[in-house]
Image: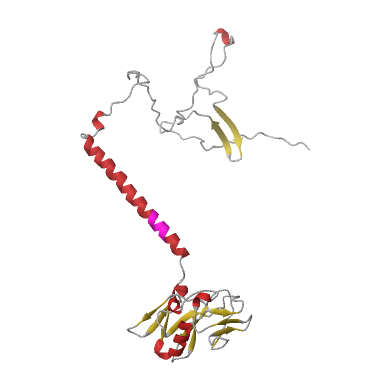
Amino acid sequence: MVVGLRAVKTAVNLPPTVRILPSGVPHASLIKLSVRAPASDHHGHGSTGPRSDKPAKWAAKTYLGPGGLVQKSNVNAPPTAHIHPRLMHTSAVALNANHVPDFTPYRASSDSGNRALSYFMVGSMGVISASTAKSTITEFLGTMAASADVLALAKVEIELGDIPEGKNVIIKWRGKPVFVRHRTADEIEEARQTDWKKLRDPQSDEERTKKPEWLVMLGVCTHLGCVPIGESGDFGGWFCPCHGSHYDISGRARKGPAPSNLEVPPHDFNEAEGKLIIG
């Protein structure tokens, strides 16, 4: 069996890969086709270039892609920003390195006015600095002061009318016991007839009391800090049972290991209100 084959020629319209002007000329104004090839003796014309109607190989390349015939062109795009060259002026006068500018137009019209302003600024800064330093020191010392609860106990007021004659009252002042004795006339006479100059801690009754009938002293034994017992002892005053110290009716050490008299705290009397103020 003989089969005859006949070639069939088919025309295909390919889509353009570049924009076509109305005149039918491709719009590729940036493609440079005037590049010259290296010199050769082709056709005996000496140094010649490629044909003007044929682009150089580096400028355009045509190949068959998946979607049809594709032409790839390399162009030189112009810069998108304007470049302004910066020129150097050569007409400037060259100054000597030791030249000092003239500040005469900026000087004060009067030296006294400028001096007054300087003094004012210096004085203001001094006042501000002194005020700041004072505030800082005051706040620092305030942190070292006693708290409100301590200041509240700095002074204690006692109604004298509540203490009958011949009786003791013990109150607390700054964490220590205080003995307040309303003495009788006999107790006052006994305390003042004692030869206080021969005592261990010589001190008269007048020095220990502001009012003869009121005796105020700390209830702390001067030996080891115990609290003596009132209305007891060999001298009718106070007795410390810890180590046997005896105090008379004026609180003076008379017997035992106590080295000194009972301490008298600072106190005063408010006559108008009839109160004793300790502290």
The vertical placement of 26 against 128, above or below, is above
Does the magenta portion include 134?
Answer: yes
* Magenta: main secondary structure: helix
Does the magenta portion include 234?
Answer: no
The vertical placement of 200 against 87, above or below, is below
Viewer-proximal residue among 198 and 131 = 198
Q: Quadrant of residue 277?
A: bottom left
State the image coordinates of residue 136 (x, y, percent, origin top left). 41, 57
Viewer-proximal residue among 199 and 39 = 199
The residue positioned 36% from the left and 52% from the top of the image is 130
Viewer-proximal residue among 50 and 176 = 176
Any part of residue 133 in sight:
yes
State the image coordinates of residue 10 (x, y, percent, origin top left). 59, 36
State the image coordinates of residue 233 (x, y, percent, origin top left). 58, 86
Viewer-proximal residue among 62 and 209 = 209
The vertical placement of 222 against 3, above or below, is below
State the image coordinates of residue 131 (x, y, percent, origin top left). 35, 54
Q: Quadrant of the C terminus?
A: bottom left
Single out the residue that lies furthest toward the left: 109
Q: Quadrant of residue 137?
A: bottom left
Start and end of the magenta stretch? 133-138
